[in-house]
């Protein structure tokens, strides 16, 4: 059999071939792309900074103005409140949807279809005007005298309508996300829990939900970010959230573009801030399947012997 | 009412859609008996096991586990399904070991073993923890308590799974091809644990392809094919001297 020998430290070349770096292939297209994209970027930057109509001074002036900040607070409140309530309702809907009792599963199915199948904007306006449909809402048991009456006009203030609309809509989406997470848990896991004699609730809490989390969390993070920007829709109800606050100012001063930039910068900033806790949560929930034991010492990587020649 | 680990079945039938998987199964397993079930894939041997602990429901027939009607209660005209709580209670008296281990990946080995006693039986955490330590040691995994299933080899996972079932103090242990998903190298360590268990006088029903294990440990052996029990007798008798032609043909292939 023929032996192939590779000489180390060949006298012909300067460096040891075993130590030569391996270079990535670069195509002509890559260089062209660098040039073209840089030119486009530079052009936009130049135009944005030199066009006086952007009025960057006005942007700076209103960026931390009180009306804007109050609007921002309301936007944050609406996002957190409707996400929290929507997730809870969504969890309930997801559990109902996977119920073996048909009417319960069907009720959740109809809810999800209705609320995902119509635009949020329409839903928001609908809830705002619900008093046209039910001027006095009476909650009670049909064909009996048991129940109470509520004046809908007083109840559905713009902010209530906004919260109700966003929550109910979000619940439908969260239900589908959570149900997707549930179905990502293997059948064997449920059988193992069953064979130990776990009750339905215990199985949900200790086996299904913890394992569904890694697939639910990233999707929920996206929903939070989407919801943060989605709250701008409630400006049509006259709720003075971030966008409406900006609109209120430019309705007076006619500085439309600078104020829209103010709002946009806040939306952008908050979105970037929100993606940090999301990645942290993602890390936390992926730890269950990580390779390191809980009490493991960190592995110190050392050079393999003889690497430093 | 006896609660001593017996299984009795008469005329069990089970279909999945148009396919009849179990056709008229009669079965008697005494307390403390080690029974191996062998047969080709699709013969219904796993389904029998899954019916015994209620992972599948039986279409018709009588099934008594630990001396009670399993999953149902009998009236003059029908069998009525038990409420979930009662079924869960019956299941706590049966241990099940799966081919794919099915440990909970979100819990450590220690937490997996404690999950049954603490979450289902409401046992004291300290007591259950101590017991889990003993059980881990008994399956040769002392010191592995803080490992997650993903950090353990297949054989180690299966031994944790056995310990998890044992933590419930069941009268009967069911094994569904416990070594089929393992490296040949790791089969021995799981079988060793099962042999230890067999010495302790617990009723064991083992669906397996390990003929060596059956010969060494089993009291009785059942050969199943096409939804029927073809042959049932003393384990060594069936393996060395099968009576039915179908059993002879099967054993010729696998031995």
Image: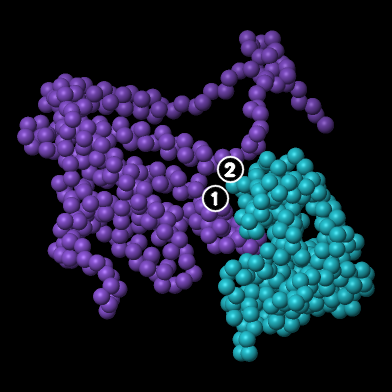
Chain colours: A purple, B cyan
Q: Quadrant of the N terminus of chain A?
A: top right
Which structural element holds mark 1?
A: helix
Q: Are marks 1 and 2 in contact (CB under 8 Å)?
A: yes
Which structural element holds mark 2?
A: helix
Residue found at the far bottom of this picture = B76
Q: Position of residue B29 (x, y in %)?
A: 81, 74
Q: Is residue B38 visible?
A: no
- Specify the label residue A68 is tagged with: none
| Residue at x 53% of width, y 49% of height | A210
Q: Is residue A98 above or below residue A221?
A: below
Chain letter behind tag 1? A
Residue ID for mark 2: A288
Q: Is residue B225 left or right of residue A187?
A: right
Q: Position of residue B84 (x, y in %)?
A: 58, 69
Camera-side residue of A289 and B167? B167
Discs 1 and 2 share one subunit: yes
User: Which of the 4 quarters of the picture holds residue B218?
Assistant: bottom right
Chain letter behind tag 2? A
User: Which of the 4 quarters of the picture holds residue A16?
Assistant: top right
Q: Is residue B194 visible?
A: yes
| Residue at x 17% of width, y 33% of height | A67
Q: Is residue A177 above or below residue A292?
A: below
Q: Position of residue B39 (x, y in %)?
A: 78, 70
Q: Is residue A239 above or below residue A40?
A: below
Q: Position of residue B166 (x, y in %)?
A: 75, 57
Camera-side residue of B253 and A219? A219
Q: CA distance from mark 1 to mark 2?
A: 9 Å
Residue ID for mark 1: A211
Camera-side residue of A55 and A106? A106
């Amino acid at each position: 059999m023929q032996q192939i020998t590779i000489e180390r430290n060949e006298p012909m070349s300067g460096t040891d071939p075993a130590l030569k770096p391996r270079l990535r292939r670069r195509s002509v297209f890559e260089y062209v792309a660098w040039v073209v994209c840089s030119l486009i970027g530079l052009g936009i930057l130049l135009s944005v900074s030199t066009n006086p109509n952007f009025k960057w001074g006005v942007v700076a002036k209103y960026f931390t103005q009180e009306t804007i900040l109050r609007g921002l607070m309301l936007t944050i409140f609406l996002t957190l409140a409707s996400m929290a309530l929507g997730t809870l309702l969504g969890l309930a809907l997801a559990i109902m949807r996977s119920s073996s009792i048909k009417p319960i599963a069907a009720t959740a199915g109809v809810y999800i279809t209705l609320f995902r199948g119509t635009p949020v904007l329409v839903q928001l306006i609908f809830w705002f005007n619900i008093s046209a449909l039910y001027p006095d809402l009476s909650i009670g048991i049909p064909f009996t005298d048991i129940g109470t009456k509520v004046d809908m006009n007083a109840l559905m203030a713009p902010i209530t309508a906004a919260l109700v609309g966003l929550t109910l809509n979000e619940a439908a989406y969260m239900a589908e996300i959570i149900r997707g997470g549930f179905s990502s848990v293997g059948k064997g896991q449920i059988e193992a829990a069953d064979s130990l004699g776990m009750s339905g609730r215990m199985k949900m809490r200790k086996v299904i939900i913890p394992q569904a989390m890694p697939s639910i969390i990233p999707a929920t993070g996206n929903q939070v970010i989407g919801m943060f920007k989605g709250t701008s829709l409630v400006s049509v109800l006259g709720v003075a959230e971030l966008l409406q606050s900006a609109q209120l100012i430019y309705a007076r001063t006619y500085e439309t573009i600078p104020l829209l930039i103010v709002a946009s910068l806040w939306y952008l900033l908050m979105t970037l801030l929100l993606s940090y806790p999301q990645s942290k949560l993602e890390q936390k929930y992926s730890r269950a399947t990580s390779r390191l034991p809980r009490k493991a010492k960190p592995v110190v990587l050392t050079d393999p012997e003889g690497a430093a020649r | 009412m006896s609660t001593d680990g017996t299984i009795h079945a008469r005329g069990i039938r089970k279909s999945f859609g148009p396919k009849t998987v179990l056709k008229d199964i009669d079965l008697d397993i005494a307390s403390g008996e080690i029974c191996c079930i062998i047969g080709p894939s699709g013969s219904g041997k796993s389904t029998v096991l899954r019916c015994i602990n209620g992972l599948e429901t039986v279409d018709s027939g009588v099934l008594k586990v630990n001396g009670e009607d399993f999953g149902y209660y009998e009236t003059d005209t029908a069998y009525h399904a038990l409420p979930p709580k009662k079924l869960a209670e019956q299941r706590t008296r049966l241990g099940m070991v799966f081919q794919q281990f099915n440990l909970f990946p979100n819990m450590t080995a220690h937490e997996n073993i404690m999950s049954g006693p603490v979450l289902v039986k409401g046992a004291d955490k300290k007591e259950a923890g101590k017991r889990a330590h003993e059980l881990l040691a008994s399956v040769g995994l002392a010191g592995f308590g803080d490992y997650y299933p993903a950090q353990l080899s297949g054989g180690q996972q299966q031994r944790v799974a056995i310990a998890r079932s044992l933590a419930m103090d069941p009268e009967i242990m069911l094994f569904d091809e416990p070594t089929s998903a393992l490296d040949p190298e790791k089969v021995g360590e799981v079988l060793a644990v099962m042999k230890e268990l067999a010495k302790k006088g617990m009723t064991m029903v083992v669906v397996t392809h390990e003929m060596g294990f059956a010969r060494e440990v089993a009291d009785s052996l059942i050969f199943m094919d096409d939804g029927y029990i073809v042959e049932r007798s003393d384990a060594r008798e069936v393996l060395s001297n099968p009576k039915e032609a179908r059993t002879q043909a099967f054993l010729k292939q696998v031995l």
